[in-house]
């Protein structure tokens, strides 16, 4: 081989610049192929992602199902009710609240006359349930009843209660007039107090014209509601008291003395939605609930009688 050819061969193999060019020429097609292959493989995934995004944007919002209702707006239904309704209306209030999510039934129990006075003085309530017609008539006359209409929803009778050990040895109704006996009644303006005095007057026909006077002479306290009578007799602070049959039922440790039907008095309970009710629709609905067969069942479980003509 001529010298020049050898020299040219050495220059060819030993030139760094030429080697680099050769490597670039060989490597470039491989890199481009790798990039192209990777990009081509990614296209289906990118296409699927794009389709999913477009579908999500175009899809309408899922409708709300009955199984996932919107949260109910909290509301409070305020009910003013006679003390003798405490047990029955506590159950009625719980049942109504359970059937109406978001509704809390706030119950205010007291003597009907006291509740009427509170309403006249501006107390805010949705419903008024009285133990007599007199207090309801007064509230109605003052324009406090919605639509001017109250509805009777229950009735009750009276009974004599005695402490479990019967320290006064009361065996018959005639014993109520025995001097020295401690008797507790509700005040005359309280419904059960008025009914009790009517019973005593009727009993004059059985025990003599002065019987009721002798009984009233034994009264040691005039209470503002029927629950206070039950409490005093239960504590032994009185030998006897006259209450509703439902209150005696709610205090099973006490003894009772029945009042014959011909001398007894039927208490009738009216209720109404109030004209200034913060929740008039709920007020009407609660009244309807109490009058319904379900509501009447709660009342009868506590000893209340249905309303009769």
Image (cartoon, rainbow, N blue to C red):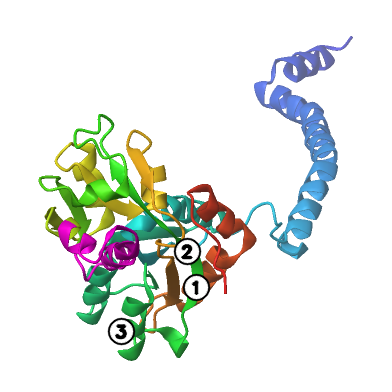
Instruction: Specify few, some or many for label 3: CA neighbours under 10 Å numbering under 14, 14-19, or 20 or more.
Output: some
Instruction: Specify few, some or many for label 1: CA neighbours under 10 Å numbering under 14, 14-19, or 20 or more.
Output: some
Q: Earlier in the sequence, mark 2 or mark 3?
A: 3
Question: Secondary structure beneath disc 3?
Answer: helix
Q: Nearer the viewer, residue 253 or 146?
A: 253
Q: Is residue 255 magenta?
A: no
Where the N terminus falls, by quadrant? top right
Q: Against 234, is 273 above or below?
A: below
> Which disc number belongs to residue 231?
none
How far apart are the two marked residues, 1 and 3, measured between alpha carbons? 16 Å
How far apart are the two marked residues, 2 and 3, measured between alpha carbons? 20 Å
Q: Is residue 173 left or right of residue 146?
A: left
Q: Residue at x 82, y 47 (%)?
A: 48
Question: Secondary structure beneath disc 2?
Answer: strand
Give the residue number, with chain letter if any, for mark 2. Answer: 155
Hey, which residue is sitting farthest right in the picture?
Answer: 1
CB atoms of marks 1 and 3 within 8 Å = no
Give the residue number, with chain letter if any, for mark 3. Answer: 138
Which image quarter: residue 99? bottom right
Span colored in magenta = 187-214
Q: Is residue 227 left or right of residue 64?
A: left
Q: Is residue 191 magenta?
A: yes
CB atoms of marks 2 and 1 within 8 Å = yes
Which image quarter: residue 63? bottom right
Question: Secondary structure beneath disc 1?
Answer: strand
Q: Nearer the viewer, residue 253 or 294?
A: 253
Q: Nearer the viewer, residue 207 or 19?
A: 207
Q: Against 240, is 62 above or below?
A: below
Of the two numbered discs 2 and 3 in the rendering, the one whose residue sits closer to the viewer: 2
Q: Residue at x 54, y 53 (%)?
A: 300
> Which disc number belongs to residue 152?
1
């Amino acid at each position: 081989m001529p010298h020049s050819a050898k020299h040219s061969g050495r220059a060819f193999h030993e030139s760094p610049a030429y080697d680099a060019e050769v490597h670039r020429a060989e490597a470039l097609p491989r890199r481009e192929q790798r990039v192209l292959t990777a990009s081509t493989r990614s296209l289906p995934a990118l296409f699927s992602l794009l389709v999913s995004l477009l579908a999500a944007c175009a899809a309408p919002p899922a409708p709300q199902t009955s199984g996932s209702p919107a949260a109910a707006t909290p509301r409070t239904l305020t009910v003013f009710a006679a003390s003798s309704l405490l047990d029955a209306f506590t159950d009625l209030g719980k049942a109504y609240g359970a059937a109406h999510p978001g509704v809390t039934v706030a119950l205010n129990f007291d003597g009907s006359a006291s509740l009427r006075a509170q309403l006249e003085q501006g107390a805010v309530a949705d419903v008024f349930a009285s133990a007599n017609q007199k207090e309801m008539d007064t509230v109605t006359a003052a324009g406090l009843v919605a639509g001017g209409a109250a509805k009777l929803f229950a009735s009750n009778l009276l009974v004599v209660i005695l402490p479990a050990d019967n320290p006064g040895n009361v065996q018959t109704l005639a014993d109520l007039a025995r001097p020295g006996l401690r008797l507790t009644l509700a005040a005359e303006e309280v419904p059960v107090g008025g009914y009790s005095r009517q019973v005593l007057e009727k009993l004059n026909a059985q025990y003599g014209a002065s019987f009721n006077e002798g009984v009233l002479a034994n009264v040691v306290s005039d209470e503002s509601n029927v629950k206070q009578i039950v409490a005093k007799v239960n504590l032994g602070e009185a030998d006897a008291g006259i209450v509703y049959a439902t209150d005696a039922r709610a205090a099973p440790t006490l003894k009772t003395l029945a009042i014959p039907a011909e001398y007894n008095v039927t208490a009738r309970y009216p209720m109404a939605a109030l004209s200034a009710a913060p929740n008039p629709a709920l007020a009407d609905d609660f009244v309807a609930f109490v009058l319904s067969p379900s509501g009447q069942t709660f009342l009868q479980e506590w000893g209340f009688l249905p309303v009769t003509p």
